[in-house]
Image: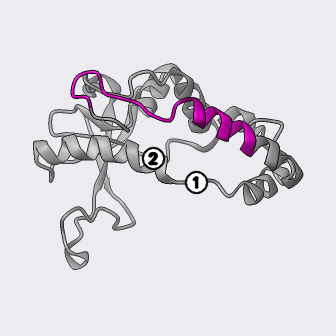
Amino acid sequence: SARTRKSGAAFAIGRQTMSTVKQPEITLKKLDEIKPYDKNPRGNNEAAVQLVSNSIKEFGFKVPIVIDKAGVIVCGHARYKAAQLLGLSEVPCIVADDLTPAQVKAYRLADNKVAEAAQWDFEKLADELAGMADFDMADFGFADSITSPAEIPEFNKQIDEAAMENTENECPKCGFKW
């Protein structure tokens, strides 16, 4: 039930050296063969699902879902839910069969956390958005109001104020603070 093709780029390095990179295979899996991870800490992602769905409709399914040997999602829960929303019967997947169970658990968390470290250059973003006449970028989560660099200071102020409201969080189970 699965079809496989080799990916054109070597990008899975893991703990391997650069000279021994394992080239991942992208496999088409039936949606009913994939299982969401029941302990997914980012389970409340319904807003993201619609945005991902819009992206898949516009650009195609360009980022595979990563699953473990048992077909449980490692990375890509929003893509999985978007595929369901779109009525897709199969989706591209990478099977992370080279990772130990501990590595799968760590990768699942790391993949989501590292994206939070990236920051926008709002002037460049405004310039890019200003040149997007053919696309409604609000479909992908970009506010209509950010269309010029002159509007960036007010936008940054709104983000800074929102960030100040939630400066410390604590895990209710282990007490870890971030």
Q: Which residue is drawn at 67% across and 35% down?
A: 161
Task: Indicate the amino acid at tag 1.
Answer: Gln
Mark 2 element type: loop
Q: Residue at x 87, y 51 (%)?
A: 148
Q: How is the image coloured?
A: one colour
On screen, residue 46 above or below 21: above
Give the magenta part as a residue range: 156-175
Mark 1 neighbour density, 10 Å: few (under 14) some (14–19) many (20 or more): few
On screen, residue 136 above or below 152: above
Q: Residue at x 48, y 46 (%)?
A: 116
Say if residue 19 shows up in the picture. yes
Q: Which residue is drawn at 44% across and 21% down?
A: 44
Measured from the top left, where is residue 49 in percent x and y?
A: 52, 26
Given the current orientation, which residue lies at the most extreme bottom position? 19
Task: Indicate the amino acid at tag 2.
Answer: Val
Mark 2 neighbour density, 10 Å: few (under 14) some (14–19) many (20 or more): some
Q: Kindly report which numbered mark, 2 or 1, lies closer to the viewer in this rendering.
A: 1
User: Mark 2 = which residue?
Assistant: 63
Q: 153 or 177, which is in the foreground?
A: 177
User: Mark 1 = which residue?
Assistant: 119
In the image: residue 43, left or right of residue 57:
left
> Hey, which quadrant is residue 35 in on the image?
top left
Dots 2 and 1: beta carbons under 8 Å?
no
Give the quarter of the figure containing the N terminus: top left
In the image: residue 80, left or right of residue 38:
right
Measured from the top left, where is residue 62 in percent x and y?
A: 49, 47
Mark 2 vs mark 1, CA separation in Å = 21 Å
Question: Between disc 2 and disc 1, whose residue precedes?
Answer: 2
Measured from the top left, where is residue 96 in percent x and y?
A: 21, 48
The circle drawn on residue 104 is: none
